[in-house]
Every structure is written in structure tokens, then in C-alpha cells.
Image (cartoon, helix red, strand yellow):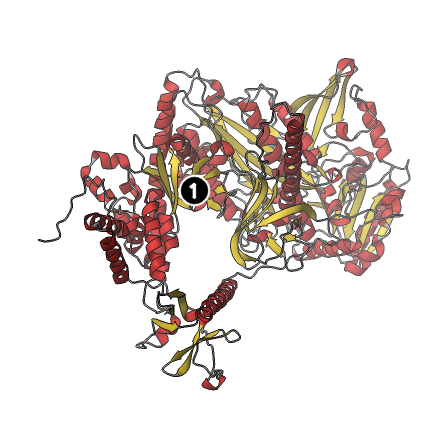
Amino acid sequence: MCSYPHIHGDGGGREGGEGEERRRRPSVLGRGDGDVRLQWHWRKGDGVWLSTAAGRGGLGWLSSSGRRRVRGRGRGDRADASSTERLTRREEKVPMADQRNGGNQPANGAKGGYKINLEKFRTRLRILYSSWRENSELWGSSDAVAVAAPPPSEDLRYLKSSALQIWLLGYEFPDTIMCFTKKQIHFLCSPKKANLLEEVRRAAREAVGVDVVMHVKPKNDDGTALMDSVFQAIRAQSRADGKDAPIVGQIAKEAPEGNLLETWVEKLKGAGFELVDVTNGLSDLLAVKDADELINVKKAAYLTFSVMNNVVVPKLESVIDDEKKVSHSVLMDEAEKAILDPGKAKAKLKADNVDICYPPIFQSGGEFDLRPSAASNDENLYYDSASVIICAVGSRYNSYCSNVARTYLIDANPLQSKAYSVLLKAHEAAIGALKPGNSASAVYQSALSVVQNEAPELVPNLTKNAGTGIGLEFRESGLILNAKNDRVIKARMVFNVALGFQNLQNEADNPKIRNFSLLLADTVIVGDQQPEVLTSKCSKAIKDVAYSFNEDDEEEDKPKAKSEASGTEALMSKTTLRSDNGEISKEELRRQHQAELARQKNEETARRLAGAGSSAADSRSAARASTDLVAYKNVNDIPQVRDLMIQIDQKNEAVLLPIYGSMVPFHVATVRTVSSQQDTNRNCYIRIIFNVPGTPFNPHDANTLKFQGTIYLKEVSFRSKDPRHISEVVQQIKTLRRQVMARESERAERATLVSQEKLQLAGNRFKPIKLHDLWIRPVFGGRGRKQPGSLEAHVNGFRYATNRADERVDVMFANIKHAFFQPAEKEMITLLHFHLHNHIMVGNKKTKDVQFYVEVMDVVQTLGGAKRSAYDPDEIEEEQRERDRKNKINMDFQSFVNRVNDLWSQPQFSGLDLEFDQPLRELGFHGVPYKATAFIVPTSSCLVELIETPFLVVTLSEIEIVNLERVGLGQKNFDMTIVFKDFKRDVLRIDSIPSTSLDGIKEWLDTTDIKYYESRLNLNWRQILKTITDDPQSFIDDGGWEFLNLEASDSDSDNSEESDQGYEPSDAEPESESEDDESDSASLVESEDEEDESEEDSEEEKGKTWEELEREASNADREKGADSDSEEERNRRKMKAYGKSRAPPSGSMPKRSKFR
């Protein structure tokens, strides 16, 4: 059993009076007659957490961590002073701490199983002597530096002497004295420790040219003679330097413990040396962290936010939701257990390397203490309306500390909302000021300035510092971020940025909510350019820390107060723990919140449009460049043919046409359509229509602009007596054209791809995470039989591969924008879906969405004439097999997702912010996003439909507003139009949503802070967005999006007329728009008209002009003899084609006379 490293801060690292003992919390270690109850105390004098054990057998001093580390004791055994003495004697056999710094691993056969990292020792010894020489004022101009570490203890304490040993040697050496001089390093210790330290002799000489001198203290010796020899060496070195009285540096604030250190301090004071304090020098030495230290801090922070996210917050939500009575001390115990067993927090770290920085802190119910010495009391967690809960968690990895603190608000009132918003801004300002070259006082001043500008009345309540440095010590005294510290901040320093408001007062009679405090803390690394917040994954955004919790039996004045709060300072709730009292109050709250969102959205849009300026142009009008397609480079390459017949040159991708006795070549890409027909005289006609620039669907490209004024051939027709030849020619041209267009399309798509990083295979680093027998969408090309494949998670991405060598897809982690896991509930498939930042190629398809799925049951139904009984054993067995298969597949996918989430939670992926999101089926609704009805489901960050293709993935953060169209009484369906922040992007229309889903969609949009409007008509959004981008200032001056406000338009008829000006049926849009663009802005109710248009367009593509169509229709009408009906039918068809309106019934259609 080994002792634990003890790390010291300023005055013990905790605030409080001198010699103060503070009660920590009781904890029951056992049950029955042998129960032991611990009471924790903070002893300011020496910076130690102690605990008194009360039970059957009296009182005794115990350590905070001794109960965790003493082995061989049952739950009901008493832990008394004698057990601590036995532990101390047992630990004396092993000279150093069981904690390793920087990942030093014990070497097999090494002394006691431990080995000092000599390379790290050399490097850090050079840094120590360099700092001592170059910053002599920080070291008190000392000639020697003496550092004495106390005996082993299981108390949780922070000592600079232990921190120096761990930093320099990798382990703690208790009851050991180190004395550094210019030429020598003296160690006064026990024989076993001296035996281990022997190996640093050579390294010290190689590093800084000093000799290591061992003073081995026998077991029963008091060490006075060895101390005299150390003092003689110091005097000799001083005389050699020409000084009479040597100056010896020591850590003045560390009180001596044990016989050896007490004797050392007494003899040091009587040795005639000038004693100085070198605390500032050691603080400066340990402030800037190297790469290994930063890794340890990051791992500690990873554990800290994992405990907060996966243990603390879920526990709080469970307690509040179920209205449980749980004390702060019980919550503290659970959080502490999660730190000591990282697996409970879903953190993949070894339990031997971790420990707590301090017992976790939980405070609520009006009793708040923002000092580091705060305690979790035995009072129950208080979570009524307007209550505040403060949680703080600190953990260590390889002795390096990290810390996070969050404040959670329950039904916040206006004062709490405002105070938290100001605190959040001030905290971010302090973090932003942590840059190399800034002073520590500038950091605090940046936070203070925010409070002075935003809420000057809260300045007296602001904490007097914005945190401290953190590392081997929880609180590095020389790096306090207050208004008086002019210490310059350097890159690779680490800070615990902690800021709060204390003793704020509510106007309430309830003492548990009258007084409240707020606290935020994060662990931050100072970067070369920007600070890195290691605990940022523990969100502190208002929407994630504010909870809605309304009592059913509230007093009558509370709903009024809450309504006022929502109107003045809207505070978005993360979770609605209970429903509101009634639909009226719920709708009123939503309306007030939407009004606040409208104001914020208009301000945000105004800032964005002002920043964009006039540079915003319509990308749809951009010219599209195409590659030069050349069939033959010169005339001599044209093949010579005997007969003047249409020829197809497959090699050169050309069509040779006989024109005026010569064979004229045309590249097949210039052919738009080719068709053939046969008349009654057995004459065959072939008609070829070419792509002509400037016509609909054929805009001018870069090639046509080179040859302006050129005459183009639009179409040619040939007659032949050989129908077989004509049929072969048509088929060959179509096949060749299809191949060329597919190749050019793929080439163009690949040219626009963003280059991806190369996949790093797991290899020997770790076993890749695999999921077998998956299908992929989009599917690979080719005519062969499709095969399933395996998905593997490697170092920096996924790889999907089948047995075919050419069927392989790599998806990089850095390219994943959203990841979804959707288990099969009412669907036939279980799937993983990745929505990407940049397109990739799957086979020959360019896509931003890649999906891997397994069918949980065969989509096959047995057709039989006879009815089967519901109690048929075969039927029951088959259904059971299907359920078992579905459950197994879902569990396999869930296991894969959990393991990948653990991989993504590693520090190296913290910047990607990746985590599998799961759709929330209970919030889903049916609609038509493209052409077919689908079940659309929200997630925490997106709106998705992942079953039908094409997939729908809408990022909520990219949404500007949502307009609910065709909303009115008597309507069975309505449409949803999503307007994106990028006005160059077409809006997304989801049609035919059942009206029964309207309230649920409104509630979801309001909960996710998305502003929505309602209208009775479908609007022409393409024209609206074009108007906004052409003249953004007018849009801002006219009130922004408020022209969509249905309530305002009802109260003001003028505004109503203006709001309807943007409406225009989608059928009336210009014909030059592509069909794809029309599908985005056209309503489902207009789809029948669009089908008629598409039929007419297809006929135009075949080459028939309007005159020909009219002529054919007239001939058909004359043959039937129904001129009147055909006239009416033509009128109806024309009105459909031009998109004016639907035809009324034939009885009411006014017939126009033929003659006027």
C-alpha cells in the first residue's frame, strides 16, 4: 500500500479563518452495530481535509480518502486511529506515491516496481535551475532551496513540496528533505528511498552539472547529524561564492509535520541562515505546463465533464421529475463514487489514476457558499419555483486537477434570468481575455466591465476574483485572477475560471428562495491564439440549465408573476417537467415567448444583412461552365464512308449526319432528343433536336459566350425506307448519349468535391469497432448482385466495405455534421445515418447523406386463400422470432453507438462535437417533404426523415423562421415552409401536414427557440427572398419578418394587403425555372397542374411545337364533331398550363362565342 500525493495551495488552497475547522458532511460507512459516521472538517492551518469518525468505539481522526484505500475492512468495521497508524506503518515500507506523473509505468524488476523517468527528470531539472538563475527575485535571491515533504497521510491536501516532487521525480517521496544548491542536490531520506534515487545521479550531472549527495537516515535516527552535514555543504558553497551568510529558501506557509520535519525546521532557524520564501518561484516554475502535463489536465477535465453530464445532471433531473427527497450529501456521495469509478460516468480511464479534487458540492434552498471550502450539507435538494441549484465537481488524473461548476435554474424569475445572462457574458469575457501577454488583473477587469455595463447594480455581488491557476495544485496562489495581480499570462498555463454572484435577494417571503447565488467555473488552457475550454461539453447555455417546473397548487399570484417574467426576459426551458395548468396559459406563454423571439430574430437578421451588404447575389443566375467536348480535332480524323447514311462513331462519341452530300460530325452531347416514327406509306422518319443556347433549359454557358453571333442548328429530320436501320441508329444514339452524360456528370461532381484527409487504420493501436452485415444507401453502381458489408470505426473515421474491392466508402469524423441512430420501432429497418459537411462519392453518386441499415424482418407477405388462426403455433413462433431478431439487431446497433460515442468523447475529438442523436418519435408528424408522404421526426438538433429517399435532414441552427401556411378553420391539412438563414438557399416545403399536428409542432418550435408565423395562403418565397436580398435596408426598416404576423395583418387591413403582395401561385412562376426549383416552393395542392405541365414539357422535348399540337387537336375534334366541348376543354387546358386558376364546373363556365 502506497501513500497518496498531497498538493498544497495558498493557505492550504482553501479560504477561511486561521486555524478554522469546517464541518464537511456526514457519511455512513456501514450498517448495524458497527456503523461509523464521518464528519469532514477543513483545517486551514495546514490545508488538510480531515474527518472524525463517530460510532461504537468513540472518536478518532480519519482521512477523507483512507476509507476508500484501506483494504481488508468490512463495511461494518470500525475505522479508528489504530487503523490509520497501521496504514502509516505499512506505507512506510514503500517510499513513494502510487500516483504517476506523465504516465510513467513501473518497470519489471525495477526497485520496488517503480522507475523514475530520467529523460523527463533531465528536462525539468534544467527548467528548475534556469528559472532559479533567471528569475532570482522570485526565488528571493536564495543560494540554496530546501523543500521538505511531510510524512505519508491519507488526508486530501495540497502541498507545494509534494507537487515539486511529483513534477520533478514522477512520484511523491514522503518524509524526505531535498536541498538544491548551485553545485549539489542533497536528499535526506530513508534507505529504500535513497536506493531508488541513486539512479538520478548521472542524469543530474548530465543535465545541469550538479552532484547528487545522499544522506541516508537509519530507522531510529533523528537525523540531526545528517542535517548538520547538509548545512556545512551550504556554508561551504556560500564561502566559495564569497558570501558570509547564506540565503536559504523554503516554503514558508507549509507547517512542519512529523519528528523529522520539526527537527529540520528548528535546526534551520538556528543555523544562522537568512531564510526567504520561495513560494513565488515554485509557483512560476509549475505554472506553464508541458505536453505531458496538458494531456493529464485534459483527461482530468474529460472525467469531470463526463461525471457532470452523465451522472450529476441525469440524477438531478430524475430527482426533480419524480419529486424525490434527496439530500445534498447523498448527491455528493454518488458524484464522488462516479469520479473514483470512471466507468459509471462512461469515461474510459483507469480508476487507479483518478481521484477527487474535493468532495463534490451541491447547494440549494437559500444556503449558498461560493468559497472553495464550501460543503454539501444534509438538507434536501430544494427545487420549487424560483429556486437555484449549484453543482461543482473536481477530479484529478495523475494528480493533475480540473474543475467545473454549473448553476441550474428552476422557473427562473426576471432577476434570476437577468443575473444569469450577465454572469454568462462576464464568464465568457474572462475566458476570452486569457491570452498570452495579458495580465491576470485584465482578465478580472474584462468580467467586471461586462457587469458594469449590463447590470451595474450587481457589481457588489460579484466575486472578488475570477478564478486561479490549476494543475498539480487545485489553487495556485500566484495565479489568482483578481484586480491586484499583475502576473503576465503565458501560453500553456491552465486556469480554473470561476465567477459568480453571491447573496442576491428575491422579493419573496419564502426564505429558501429569498437568498440565492450563481456560480460558473470551467477549466481553460491558455493557447497561443485562443483559449481552449476543456469542460465546454458541459453546457452552460441558458436553454440547457433552465428548467420549467410549475406546481399544480400554486398561489394565485404566481402565474401572474411568471407571465410578467416571460414578457420581460424570456428564458427558454430545457425540459418541461410537468404540464401547465391550462391550455390558455400555455398558449399565452408561448405567444409571449414568440414575441420575444421575433424581436431577437429581427435584430439578428438585420445584423447579418448589414454585414453581407450588397455582395449578396442570387447564385441561381450564375453562369454554369461546361467542358469543351470535341469529337474530332481536325478534318482528317473524320472516317471516310461509302454510303451517305447516318453513322455512329462509338470511339469518338460522334454522330455523322449526311448534309448536302458531306458527312458532318456532331458530338453526341450536343443532341438533346432523338425520335423516330413511321407513316402509312412505310416511310420512316428520324428527328434529331440539338441543344441550342439561349432556349429554356439551355442557358448560355462559357463555350457559347466565346462564339457570339454564331448560327446554331436546332433540328434535322431524315427519311428512310429502312426501318431497321433507323431503329438501330436511334437506339445507338440514346445509349451513347446516356453513357457520355453519366460520365461527364460524375466528372463534374468529382471536380467539386472537397479533398478529405486519409483514413488512419486502427492497426495495433486498438481493435476497430465493427458492425457486420449492413446495407448502404445510396447503393453502389453496377449490375452485379448487391452484397452487404461491414462498418468499422478507425482512428479518424469510418470505413464501409463489401467483399468487392471497388465497393468501399470512407467517412471521416471531421466531415460528419450530424450522426443519427434510429432503432426499428414501427419501421422495418434499424439504421445509422451520417449527414456530412462536404459531399463524398458513393460509387458514382455524389452525396451528403450516407446511411447504413439492416432489415429487421423480411418484407414478404405469404399470399394464401385460407385464413390462419390467431392461435396458430407456427404463426406465434414466427412472430416471436421476428421480435427476437429485431431486439438483437437494435442491441447490436446500440452497443456500436455507445462504443463510438465513447471514442468521440476522447479529448482529441472535443472540437468536433460529435454524438449520435436519436429521433424523438413522440414529436413526429406526417407530411410530404418531396413527393411522397413520410413520417418526419425531430431530434435534439435536427428535423429528419431517414426512411424514405431522398432523405431529409434540416439543421435547426440554420433555420431563420418557419411559416405555417394554409392554416385556418375547416382545413384538414396545412403546409410548413422552412426559411434558412442563407437567403440564397431555396426554402423547404413540407406539405399536407394533418391539422391535428399543428399544436404539437408549435410547441416543439417554441421549445427549440424557432420563431414561427402563420398564414392562410401559400407565399411565393422565391420572390420574397429576392426582394429581401435586393433591398435589405427596406426589409429592416419595414419591421423585418413582422409582415408575416397574421394577428397584425388582421388588425390592420393595409398591412394585410402588403403581406399578401408576396403571394403568387407557384404555377405562375417563370418557365425558365427548373423543375427541381419548382418542387421546393410549390404546394401539394398544385401538383395536379404541375403534372399536366410536365406532360406538355415532355411532348415539347419530343419536338412537337404548339402549332402542331393545336393542329392535331383540331383534327381530332372535327373527327368527333364536338367543337363546343373541345373549345371548352382547350380553354381549361390552357388555363392550367399557364397557372391562372382551376376551372370551375362546366355548367358555370362562360362559353365564348366564336364570332364577335
Image location (x, y in percent) of residue 824: 58, 36
Q: Residue at x 37, y 72 (%)?
A: 719
Q: How many marks?
A: 1
Given residues 805 and 468, the one toward you in this image is 805
Image location (x, y in percent) of residue 997: 41, 32
- Asked whether, in this view, residue 1072 is left or right of residue 32, the answer is left
Q: Residue at x 56, y 22 (%)?
A: 381
Image location (x, y in percent) of residue 903: 65, 45
Secondary element under disc 1, as helix, strand or loop, is helix
Residue 984's place in the image compared with 683, above or below, is above
Furthest toward the front, the residue is 681
Q: Amino acid at mark 1?
A: Val
The quarter of the image holding the N terminus is: top right
The residue to which callout 1 is attached is 450
Residue 106's place in the image compared with 304, above or below, is below
Image location (x, y in percent) of residue 1015: 30, 38
Give the quadrant of residue 256. top right
Report whether residue 273 is seen: no
